[in-house]
Amino acid sequence: APPEAVLARGWPAQQAPTPKKDVLSYNNFYEFGTDKSDPAELSGDFKPRPWSVVVDGLVDNPRTWDIDALIKQFGQQERLYRMRCVEAWSMVVPWLGFELGALLRAAAPKAGARYVAFTSVVRPAEMPGQRGGLFSLKWPYVEGLRLDEALHPLTLLATGVYGEPLPNQSGAPIRLVVPWKYGFKSIKSITRITLTDQQPPTSWNQMAPNEYGFYANVNPMVDHPRWSQASEQIIGEGSLFSAARKPTELFNGYGQQVAGLYKTMDLRKEF
Amino acid sequence: MPPAGQAGRKTSRFSPLMRQVLLYAFGLVPGLLDITQGVLGTLGANPVAVCLHAFGRYAFRFLLLSLAITPVRRFIGVNLILYRRPLGLLAFTYAAAHVFFYVGATRHFEGHILWRDFTSRPFLTFGFLAFLILVVLAATSTKRTIRALGRKWAVVHRFVYAALVLACVHYSLAFKTWHIEPFIYAGMAVVLLGLRVFKKPARQSV
C-alpha cells in the first residue's frame, strides 16, 4: 500500500520511507552476525514457519498462538514509523502489524502485572551468530517494556514490512516495534511474551549497563558514552563524501504521544 | 651514491625512489577501490561507514607493517628499510582519510560536536592522539627534516610506539560488543613491540 495512506491514519513519520533495498540489507540482528550485511546474507537457513508465540505469566488467559492464527485474529495494519538506532543512524520503515496492546488485552493481564518480558529464538543451527562467539551477546536475546509502554497504541507487533511478510533479516515472523525507543528494544523473532511483576533483564543492558539502559528512550540530551546522540545519519540519503544527517528528536519525535509515560522520571538517570 | 643499493643483491630496474613511489601507489589501491565502489553505489546502505571503518583498518595495517621492518632485518636478516617510509606514509594517508570521513563526511565539521567528542570520549581521544602523532611523523619524514633533526629525529619517531598503543585502545573500543579483530591487531602490536625488547642478544651489526 502507498505510504500516503499510512500518513493519513495519523501516524506520521514526516519523511518518505527509506528505500526498500536499504531497509532489507542494513540490519542489526546479531543472531546472524555483527556486520550490517550479515543478517541479509546469512539468514537463508532460518525457517520462520511453523512458529508459535507463547503468551504467559501474570495473565488470566495464557495461550500458545500459532503465528498465522495470530495474524488472522489481530490483522495487519500499515504503520510508517521512524526507526532510530542507538548507533546514531535512522530509517523510516513501512511496517505491517497489529498493536501489542490488542494481544495483551486478549491475554487479560492480572492486577499484579507491571512489565512485559520478551524472549527471542535460539537456533544455532540456523543462526550463525549464535554459534560460539566468546564475546557475543548471551542467547536468547531478551527485552522488556513496562506494561503501560507495552499497551501504548504506538507499540506494534510487526509481521510484515513493505507490504510483504517479514523477511528473515528483519525478524521473521514476528517482532516488536517501539518507535520512540532505540532500535535494540524492538526484539526480533519473538517466541515468548511473559507478563511479570518485576523489571525483566534485557540483553544490551546486561552486556553494558552503563551504555544501554532499560528504557532506552531516544534522547538527544543523553549521549552514549562513546558517541553523541544529538544527531543521526539518515540511511539512504547523502553521498560517500557527505552523509545526510538531521537533529535527533526527544522520543524520536513521538513525544506528543508518549512523553506522559515518563512525566515523573529523570530521563538522564533512567536512560 | 644513495645508500639504497645495500638492500638489493642485484641492481633493480627501478631506482630506490621509484620503488618507494611504486609501493606507496600500490598501497593506495584498496582505498581507491573502496572509494570507487562508494561513488558507484555498490557499498550498501551506508558507504560512509564502510569507508570510515575500512580506512581505519588500512591505517592500522600499514602502521604494523612499517613497524615490522626493523624486526625483519634484525631476526630474519632481510633489509627492507627502503620501504619503511612509504609504509609509514601509507599509514598516515589512510589515517588522514579515516579522520576526514569522521570529521567531514559524518560530522560535517561541526566544531562543538567534535570538541565534545575529542574532550569527553576516550574512544575518540585515543584515536585522535594517535593521528596527531602520525601527522608529526609524516611531517618530519622528508630527507631535509631528517638531516636537520639529526639524532633528535630518532627520538621524535619513537612516538610511533605511542601511536600504536593508542590505536590499539581506539580500535578495541570501536564496537558495541567485544570483537576478535582488535585483539588480533593488538596481539601483532605486542609481538612487534616485544621483539624490540630483545635488542641486546641480536647480532652485532651484520
Image (spheres, coloured by chain):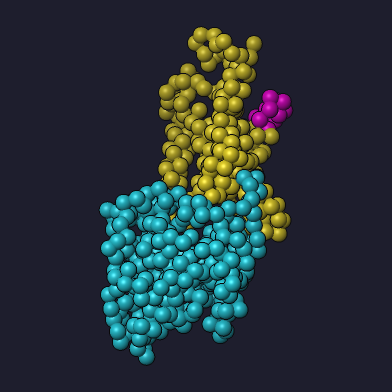
Chain colours: A cyan, B yellow
Give above or below for A271 relative to B68. below
The answer to whether residue A186 is left or right of residue B98 is left
Q: Nearer the viewer, residue A265 or A251?
A: A251
> Residue A195, located in which quarter of the rendered image?
bottom left
Q: Who's the residue at 49% across and 80% down the image?
A: A152
Q: Nearer the viewer, residue B204 or B189?
A: B189
> Does the segment drawn in magenta span residue A187?
no
The answer to whether residue B73 is left or right of residue A105 is right
Give above or below for B33 relative to A230. above
Give above or below for A220 relative to B143. below
| Highlighted magenta segment, given as a residue range | B140-152
> Does the segment drawn in magenta span residue B147?
yes
Q: Who's the residue at 62% across and 36% down the image?
A: B93
The residue furthest top is B10
Q: Who's the residue at 67% across and 38% down the image?
A: B136
Image coordinates for residue A248, horizontal then vertical, percent: 62, 65
Q: Nearer the viewer, residue A141 or B77?
A: A141
Image coordinates for residue A65, horizontal then vertical, percent: 29, 73
Image coordinates for residue A157, horizontal then vertical, percent: 42, 71
Give above or below for A163 relative to B4. below
